[in-house]
Amino acid sequence: MPNTYRTSDEIVAQRLEDGRDMNLSLQNMNLFASGAFSNVYRGIARTESNHQMEIVIKKTWPRHKGCPLEVKILGKLGKLKHKNIVRLLFSYQKQHEGRICLGLIFEYIPMNLHQFLKDNNRRVDIIEVKLIVWQLFRGQAHLEKSEICHRDIKPQNLLYNADTGLLKISDYGSSAIESVKTPQQSYHVTRYYRPPELLLGSKNYGCKIDTWSCGCVFGELLKGGIFLAGKSAKNQAEVVFDMFGVPTAEDVSSMNVSNTKYKEIIQSYEPDTSKRTADLAYLYNQTASFQRDRRSTVYNTKIDYSDMKDSVELLRQVLVYNPSRRLCGIEFLTNPFFTVLFNEKTVRFNKKKIQCVSAVDLQAVKSGDVTLTNESVEHST
């Protein structure tokens, strides 16, 4: 990827809110994260009226002319300003060595969920699990309502403010619009979070692929480690089969899988005769035998038997083969499992009361969820 690193820059950026061009001064820019297709920088943006905001910039190199799909999707989401969806504030383009660099300027969130879990040795209590999971499924429900398939939900793409507990779904570089009926590539979603229909070659799928990924994050929080850890795409399918059984003919039909791919995997599949991970019972029923196998070892010791069993009961309704039967949306979010989050006396691990969700949010969900953030971008220049 071309090097565009500069600690400061002067740009003209288009404000998402109204399409207006604004002069921005970028200062104290430092590399925050890097990947194969983009780099992310953290710093300060200052407007002509001297309004200052902490931001991150994702710099990419579009392969085709025109507005990238990621920008269209972020624009659509940004106008609704849902509190569990990261906000694109500005976008801009600059020439660099004969190529166009696209800059996407986002609100700044201190860390992602992967970093938070790592900092806490992957052990979080049941209140934090419920808080994270409720917001994740709420954000995903909003994406589905907006006909957007994220196609890469995982802890690294979930921004998390450990102090307040606020979670936001980010990184829409792999996303697609569900209403587009043309066949899609099945090689999407990071392997550990990839749903069975994609592992089995389906090219006709919808937003329920994200529901499966959310379920895998839920399982990861409970286990304290990767929930479905396959060593390859083929082995990932086998790990899923070991846990949930071989899909029935009805399941296969519901997932629109490739018959060729399915036969290829199923013919060489050798079931785990120990059934250590079958039906998720190992999560609340740890034995010495289970603890000798990383697949069935629970590392999160902060959740007691009763809470773990209740969690598994809910998770079993999410991770099912038939996409249309995966529990999500209002049915998931109004489950009694989450009632404690809306009790004003509930305290998080940091001894602070929950402020990022409240009874108002729950009512918003029940009413269709058009909740806006209470954050704003300066309107004057």
Image (cartoon, rainbow, N blue to C red):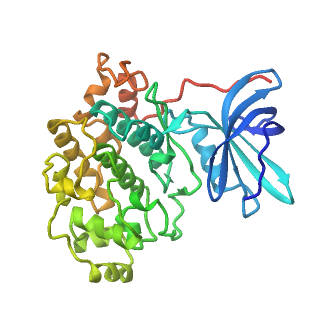
Q: Quadrant of residue 192?
A: bottom left
Residue plotted at (51% across, 47% down): 157
Residue plotted at (23% across, 66% down): 242
Q: Position of residue 291 (x, y in %)?
A: 20, 53
Q: Quadrant of the C terminus?
A: top right
Which sits in the foreground, 290 or 130? 290
Q: On screen, 75 above or below 83?
A: below
Q: Position of residue 296 (x, y in %)?
A: 22, 55
Q: In screen coordinates, is 271 left or right of 118?
A: left
Which sits in the foreground, 231 or 12? 231
Residue plotted at (31% across, 24% down): 342
Residue plotted at (64% across, 50% down): 72
Q: Position of residue 260 (x, y in %)?
A: 37, 83
Q: Quadrant of residue 303?
A: top left
Q: Quadrant of the N terminus?
A: bottom right
Q: In screen coordinates, is 333 left or right of 27?
A: left
Q: In screen coordinates, is 140 left or right of 311?
A: right
Q: Quadrant of residue 278?
A: bottom left
